Image (cartoon, helix red, strand yellow):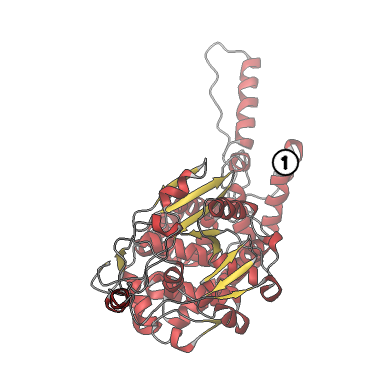
Amino acid sequence: MIKKLFKRIFSKPATLGREPAGPAAHLNMGTPKKLKASYGVHKPKVWNVAEHKIDRHLVSHNAIRVCETLQSKGYKAFVVGGAVRDLLLGMRPKDFDVATDASPEQTQRLFRRARVIGRRFQIVHVMFGPETIETSTFRALASASNEKDEHGRVLRDNEFGRQDEDASRRDFTVNAMYYDPSTETVWDYHHGMEDLRARVLRMIGEPSLRYREDPVRMLRVVRFAAKLNFEIEPATYAPIAELSDLLRNVPASRLFDEMLKLLMSGSAMACLKGLREAGLHHGVFPLLDAILEHERGEPFLTEALARTDKRVKEGKPLSPGFLFACLLWHLVLENWEKKLQQGELKFPALFAAMDDVLAEQTERTAIPRRLTGDMREIWAFQPRFEKRAGKAPFRMLEQQKFRAALDFYELRAMVGDVDADIELAEWWREFSDGDVNNRQNMLDALRGTPAGTDGAAKKKRRRRKPKQGAGTQGTGAASSSNTEQGQHGE
């Protein structure tokens, strides 16, 4: 008995933070190591359905299916992140993410249509028709061994961990809650429920360090504050102005993705103003000062983004190319007018103005070529609306971007933009909505209009010399044909 007592007293204590045997044993976590004193092991506050009041009917059936499938095999699985935040606010989330203690390979084996993606941190896309449930494994705490650049941005981080570590790795307290659809409970590790009810955005951990790890978090806090109408906690907001230059080290493709989320958030104008107030636009959108201070551009952009926000709230689709075309139009217009004053021809001057503005902006945010192509088409259409003679209107209708370009022209006319006529916009809308006969009647009605009022003078009819030996009838036929060409040709 005495030997057993001595053995128990002097035996090596268990390593702090070791998980009990069970589902977590399958993770490739390496040898358990002592936890950092600054974090420790967090125990969550568990909120029941009577306290959190989440309507389970707002949760994606496929997200529930992913959680229940993983749980049936002995793994933990929760709906996590922004979806939980939105559910707690009574909003229907746009997409759903799941977090689990199953490894990516183990998750993939449980679903017929699933694939592992990602290099920095592997996740699984579980696909159900048009819906994809992004499923990630709990992440470990960041350590000194993680690969970082000279500014502190984490470059490679592919370590799995416990649920409480995963919660500490998330950015804001309101985004670090976990919803279990099976028990209808919310697991809250960082007082996220309290901050959500107070409508406050608070960074988890030391803000400066977290921004250095991923500077995009500075954009995210501005976007969430505008979208949710939340206040940013002072300590979370304070380092942003000083660290804004870190955004220059972020890949341009990531900045574009974040910019697109901002514009399609449903609070685009508030987001842009928030970026400007925080001093973040220089690293993301260098033309923002010029856009918001442009005498003619500000009313146009305000109306364009108001329409965009309305479409988002109504659940209607949006065109990213149209959004960026609105955002940069008045810089193109100003540049175009300068080139015209220098004596350049109309269309070459317009295309040169497009190139100048796009070169300055795409260098920073890497707008994809497919979108810059859409923007160019929309812009190039604008002076063409002035021309309604001949077959040009019919050819314009056949162009893929005609509707978007007409919407753009109508928007310009509504805010009194230069060279945009509301009556002309209404004519084109009626023309595009009419049938073939109605369209031809509308064009016929313009024939009596004096030359020049439609933006193009009628071309002189060219008479073809009759062939030698041709009769009067042949000459008349040729004349009739040429008359027709003169009236409907371009």
* Residue in the image at 60% along x and 60% along y: 94
Residue at the farthest top position: 469
- 311 and 75: which is toward the camera: 75
For the C terminus, give its image quadrant.
top right
Does residue 272 appear anywhere in the picture?
A: no
Type of the residue with mark 1:
Arg
- 205 and 149: which is toward the camera: 205
Where residue 463 appears, as percent x and y from the top left, is 56, 29
Above or below: residue 173 compared with residue 235 = above
Does residue 45 appear anywhere in the picture?
A: yes
Above or below: residue 322 compared with residue 191 = above
For the N terminus, give its image quadrant.
bottom left
Marker count (numbered) = 1
Q: Is residue 368 left or right of residue 230?
A: left
Where residue 384 appears, as percent x and y from the top left, is 56, 50
Q: Is residue 311 left or right of residue 212?
A: right
* Residue in the image at 53% along x and 16% along y: 467
Residue at the farthest front position: 1
Q: Helix or strand or loop: what does disc 1 sit on?
A: helix
Where residue 273 appears, as percent x and y from the top left, is 52, 78
Instruction: Identify the residue under disc 1.
Output: 439
How dense is the environment of label 1, judged by Cα within 10 Å: few (below 14), some, or many (20 and up)?
some
- 33 and 258: which is toward the camera: 33
Q: Is residue 50 left or right of residue 80?
A: right
Where residue 146 appears, as percent x and y from the top left, is 27, 67
- 463 and 12: which is toward the camera: 12
Q: Quadrant of residue 322?
A: bottom right
